[in-house]
Amino acid sequence: MILKKIIFNTALLLISAFSFSQNFNVQELGKAKLINVSGGASANSIFYSGNAERDPFSYFLNGNININIAGLYNLPFSFSYTNQKFGYGKPVLMNRLSIHPSYKWITAHIGDVSMSFSPYTLSGHQFSGVGVDLTPQGNFKISAMFGRLLKSSEYDLAYPDIVPAYKRYGYGFKTSYAFEKVNLGVTLFKAKDEAGSLSNPIPFELGISPKENVAVSFETSFALLGKLQVFTEYANSSITEDTRTKDDGKAKGIASFLLNRNSTSASYDAFKGQLTYPAGKGTLGIGYERIDPNYRTLGGYYFNNDLENITVNATQNILKDKISLALNLGLQKDNLDKQKQSQMKRLITSLNADLRPNDKLNLSLNYSNFQSYTNSRNQFDYINQVSNYDYLDTLNFRQVNQNAALNINYLLRNDKRLKKAISANFSMQDAVNQQQGQTIAGGASTYYNSAVSYSIGYPEKDLNFNGSLNNTYGKTDSGKNLIFGPTIGASKLFFDKKLTTNASTSYNTSYNDGEKQNDIFNIRLNASYIYVQKHNFNMGIISLFSNASGRKNNDLTATLTYSYSFDKIKMRPKREPVTEEKVTSDPILKINFKDKIFEGTRDQIIAQLKELQLSLHPLPTEENNNLEHLITLATLTPDDKELKEKVLDYLDAHSAAAETLEKYNDYFLEAAQKLEKEMNQKDENLENGYAIAMGRVNTHKLHGVNEADITNKTLYNSYLKLVERSNSSRNQLKNHRWMLSELSIVAKTPAKEIQQNENAAEFSKQNVEEIFKLIRDKKNAAEIVNAIEEKIIPFYHDLAVKNTDNDELDLKYIQK
């Protein structure tokens, strides 16, 4: 353990000189010729006056620095500081350190990082240590980790809210291998607390003891009947609740054999199975999951347990993908070991529908129905027990929750002079609690929410108005409640769009059974000014006036923010003269997103977004329409600050789509390489089959004989069958060779360039929606590669039939 600590601390010391939470590619490091530094700092102060329990004055300091190497790698650092106490009696300054270097198919994770192997083993728990992902091309993948999962935390009476903890280390690995028809995966995770890591004893009543845990899982996926995809996972977690206990244990799970067992040891199982079948432009699926009561591991922060789930789901796109439908049904129950006093059953139904008839109109409808049933066990099961169960006859309980929502967005006009849009939304939440079939007192409630908003903008005047009417109506046993009121707002740009001003006001009135309860009136004012593109001043005031039953209250909150950003501080600076072309009447906006900077006027930034959009292909129609819709929203936004938010919304969605597309190209390439390998293995057998068939024709008695001279029709018919078989073998070999030639080209193409291949691009156009769905559903890599391979074969075979000619075949194996 001492050696492990030395290695671990040395690694952290070395990497602390490099980065805060960033990836870099070691393979390209030698190409770096220039280092750029960018970043910024901001100070925010808040003044408050009112009746709420909060500090009258608080401030926040934030800063970030990003080091860019040769335009390829980014090493960001950030800090934050505030006078808020957070219950510790002093200001808080927190930093987290991580680095993720990569080389070809090797990626390392060093520092404060997290990894996920399985939902039932290591699942997103942060650790301080090292991890690695090995993803070479081919069938074999492996991930591994080692590090400290928890710091030791001493028990201190002065801070009773701080939970004491033992120092905890863990390690694990996950490996998978894709065979020809079956994919297998194995995961192992082990964690153990250091019993001697605390100097002060922890009170017994807190129930905290040093633990040890081993969890293993086995995954498999395969295809049945061509298209039916099957996925299963079985996991076992064995845990010793107190390693200080010195006696023999009886835990019998698979994982328990790697555990130091004692009387506090126990073992738990989990199982999950999923069947998915493609249907039309959608899928049908059914799933089953069972998790033992008390199932957990030390590799996650939270685990569902004591449940049995049966789920059915279906998705479909219809009417040329203008309508998207999704249906989910689920049945869940607990008390699997019959040890609880009651059992709960839940029935869940949800339906989602999206309609996009054109670029102007967008509608979405959502409905869900959640029902739960709690049934007591037979009270005679408890007659002879000491505990009192007077309430047993009250446990036959049924709860039903229904939710429905409708959203409508319509773009009325969009040109340089005028932009108008209207939107409306409606939602309903209904809850009923029943006992013995009757609604209990106070157990029924229904709430309706609705809002209609309208916006109009004058781009040439940098002026925008918006208004909305909001309403909430509720019915409960205690009465009927109504809250409604309007909101109006306006925004205007001044001084060549350097000064942005916003103002809005709203008035809400609430009633209970027709009697007025409260009046709330608020005013919001905000102004921001940009000076020489680097200094940003922002001031905001919110004043709220309320009158509840004659009691008046006034809250005032004022904020003042200053931010400074710097960019392109070069280690080897080179001055560039400012030309007249860079001077423009429109303000220059700068938007930072991850490792990219979008800079220019509004129109230039929108043009950059459209150029980004063109670079994403292929994309499913729905995803492409969503991205175009986000660009439209950005175009309609007259306020520069709101424009930045809309641009960031688009960039978030674009980044997610680009990441999925990158995975798609990687999977496509892997499928092509796998298929090329399989076809190369079959090539000689196909040639031999054709050579044998051709030999039988050539050696037949009637070969070369004129048909008019043949008198033995039976013998002639057998000869024709041999000719037919020979021609069939020849066509099969020719089609095979053409497919192999085309797939060899694809297999040698880098994943980023694979869509430049004409046939690959056409294949993607036809199948991208289904493959994207598998990626978004987080199917494992082998399952996705197999799905692509199954679609490649008939696609390229059809092309081969159309493109092969009658030239002579090259019998390369016979010649050898």
Image (cartoon, grey):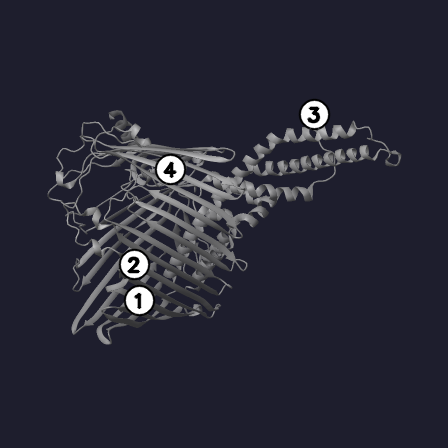
Amino acid on which the number 3 mark rests in the picture: Ile
Which of the two discs, 4 and 3, sits closer to the camera? 4
Residue 417 on image: x %, y %: 47, 70
243 to the left or right of 673: left
Against 780, is 413 above or below? below
| Residue ranking furthest to the top | 816
| Residue tagged 3 | 814
Visible in this render: residue 145?
no
Q: Secondary structure at mark 1?
A: strand
Q: Which numbered disc, 2 or 3, marks the residue closer to the eye?
A: 2
Which of disc 1 and disc 3 is earlier in sequence? Answer: 1
Are there few (<14), some (14-19), or many (20+) residues within 10 Å of tag 3?
Answer: few
Earlier sequence position, callout 4 versus callout 1:
4
Label 1 neighbourhood size at 10 Å, few (<14), some (14-19), many (20+)? some
Rounded to the nearest angstrom, the CA distance separating label 2 from label 1 is 16 Å
**Quarter containing the N terminus:** top left
Residue at (29% x, 60% y) in the render:
538
- Residue indicated by mark 4: 234
Q: Position of residue 801 (x, y in %)?
A: 68, 42
Query: Decide: marks 2, 1 in contact (CB < 8 A)?
Result: no
Task: Return the residue at label 2.
Answer: 399
* Amino acid type, callout 1: Tyr
